[in-house]
Image (cartoon, grey):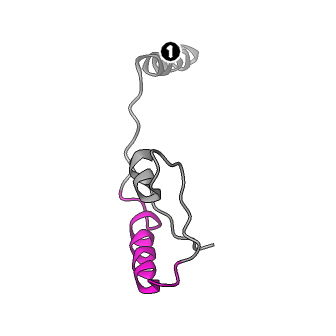
Amino acid sequence: MDIPYAIVPSKAKLGELAHKKTCTCLALTDFKDNAAELENLCKNFREKFQGPPAHSRKPERGFKAIQKEKKIEREIAAKK
């Protein structure tokens, strides 16, 4: 739907924009006075958050996952 969005590191930072202690979400609805500023914000949000992911890394496996994988490998080797 091409709706620009941004992710803020904490609820307190977002609350500063809304002049509250904390805030979970914020929607801009009436932005007639500074339309150019809103377009600039939208362009920045799209570039930062809606573009391709920077990189993905393979998640590390825990001890139990490694042991389970070894057990499965041993069972497969025993069947051969």
Q: Nearer the viewer, residue 71 or 53?
A: 53
Decide if residue 57 is on the left or right side of residue 69: left
Q: Which span is picked out in magenta? A: 31-54
Q: Nearer the viewer, residue 30 or 46?
A: 30
Res. 79 image quadrant: top right
How many discs mark residues in the rendered view?
1
Task: Identify which residue is drawn at 54% across, 54% down.
Answer: 25
> Magenta region, mostly helix, strand or loop?
helix
Decide if residue 77 is on the left or right side of residue 10: right
Task: Identify which residue is drawn at 52% across, 78% down.
Answer: 31
Q: Nearer the viewer, residue 63 or 31?
A: 31
Q: Residue 30, position in %: x, y? A: 57, 76
Q: Residue 3, position in %: x, y? A: 57, 71
* Residue 30 shown in magenta: no
Residue occupied by mark 1: 71
Question: Split into 4 quadrants, where in the image is the N terminus?
Answer: bottom right
User: Circle 1 — which element?
Assistant: helix
Task: Identify which residue is drawn at 38% across, 73% down.
Answer: 44
Dot 1: few (<14), some (14–19), or many (≥20) neighbours within 10 Å?
Answer: few
Question: Split into 4 quadrants, where in the image is the C terminus?
Answer: top right
Residue 34 drawn above or below residue 16: below
